[in-house]
Image (cartoon, helix red, strand yellow):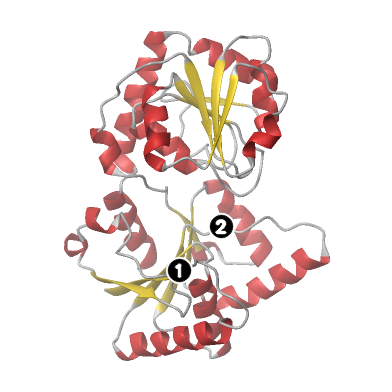
Amino acid sequence: MRVVVATLGPPQEKPWWWKHIDFSGMRCEAHYARLVYKNRHSQDVSTAQLPTVMFMVLWRLLKWRRDRISHVFTIECDLVGLAIAFWQSTLLMRRPKHVIVQFIMREKVATVRSRLKYQLMRFLFRSVHRVVVSSTRELAYYRSVFGWPERKAVFVPVLTSPELLNEEIVGDDDFYLAAGRTFRDYTTLLRAVAGTGLRVVVVGGRGAAGDFVDAGANITVLEDIPWRELENLMRRCRAVVVPLEDRAISTGQSVVLQAMALGKPVIATRTAGTIDYVDHLHDGILVAPADAPQLRDAMLQLEDAGLRRQLGQRARAKVAAGHLPEHYARAICQATVR
């Protein structure tokens, strides 16, 4: 099996997870291809640059075909993945086999723009060999909206860094940490902690503080902080709270797994992004969507230091047993060759 993992953007080294995978042990010859376009200092591709990028992808695709590459992997629905799907669907190419990992797309809504987008994507993705999703709930959703056969979409749990397992848990401070912005339900979190005196640190993207103007003195909001600072907060916090909107597509797994790898108990909304990663009351706590009283009870339950320690230890063991780059790569290879 000869594979290429292709990404697009400014020059960079191989992804962080590459060094943690032994491809030889999988009987897989793997190569990393970073397609660099003219704008070397930005992730964005302008309209003027798009034709150049499209033909650059076509040239690479034909080269991989000549080199007898069996599979090309792209990540999420990035531009290089969409460009490969376009050329293979348009030119009726089936080699190399195209696999999209960590596939995610905004849910279809009742607007003309959304319907047209999904019609276009249905055309593009018809040439894709496999789509790997990060949640079992997403399988039925994507198969339905795109009309895919059952074998086309597969579920593989996402990964996190094994280096987090080596981090010492340095404290158990009196605050809860909530991080992330996509499809977060911070309104329910604020309702849950109102009047409890529980301290919460919220880490969001740029402009996040504007959503918490009247949050109260027990809520601290940080914007766009470096990863090492976020990791330090995770190591010190009492528990990590991931309040999510109830969606068919998944989000929140990265924060959940990072916290679990650091041995921190997680309280998360029971939805697509968490049901495959947290076992309720075994290695974390799941609460119903938009249920502030249930979320409050879960946070108060974790005031018990013994329960926090028990859930955190089990969470860390789960990550070590099944959510590392080596596990992910092996599962992808098994799902791809079927």
Circle 1 residue:
41
- Residue at (66% x, 39% y) in the render: 246
Secondary structure, mark 2, is loop
Q: Residue 215 at what x, y percent from top left?
A: 68, 23
Determine whether the residue tagged by mark 1 lies in a helix, strand or loop: loop
Q: How many marks?
A: 2
| In this view, the mark in front (2 or 1) | 1
Q: Which of the 4 quarters of the picture holds residue 210?
A: top right
Image quarter of the N terminus:
bottom left
Q: Is residue 21 left or right of residue 47?
A: left
Asked whether the residues under the numbered discs 2 and 1 touch, taking CB atoms below 8 Å apart as contact, a structural biologist would say: no
- Compared with 267, 10 (above or below) is below
Residue position marked by numbered label 2 in the rendering: 104
From what the image shows, is residue 102 above or below residue 168?
Answer: below
Q: Residue at x 20, y 67 (%)?
A: 27
Q: Earlier in the sequence, mark 2 or mark 1?
A: 1
Q: What is the x, y in percent for residue 272? A: 58, 42
Q: Which residue is depicted at the point 68% across and 75% down? A: 120
Residue furthest left in the image: 24
For disc 1, the neighbor class at 10 Å (few under 14, some 14 to 19, many from 20) is: few
Residue situated in front as seen by the camera: 71 or 183: 183
Q: Nearer the viewer, residue 38 or 266?
A: 38
Q: Where on the picture, by quarter, is residue 313?
A: top left
Q: Is residue 16 left or right of residue 174?
A: left
Where is the C terminus found, in terms of image quarters?
bottom left
Q: Please state the horizontal and vertical placement of residue 306, each as a whole percent of the image.
A: 37, 9
Type of amino acid at the residue the image marks with label 2: Ile
Residue 20 seen by the camera: yes
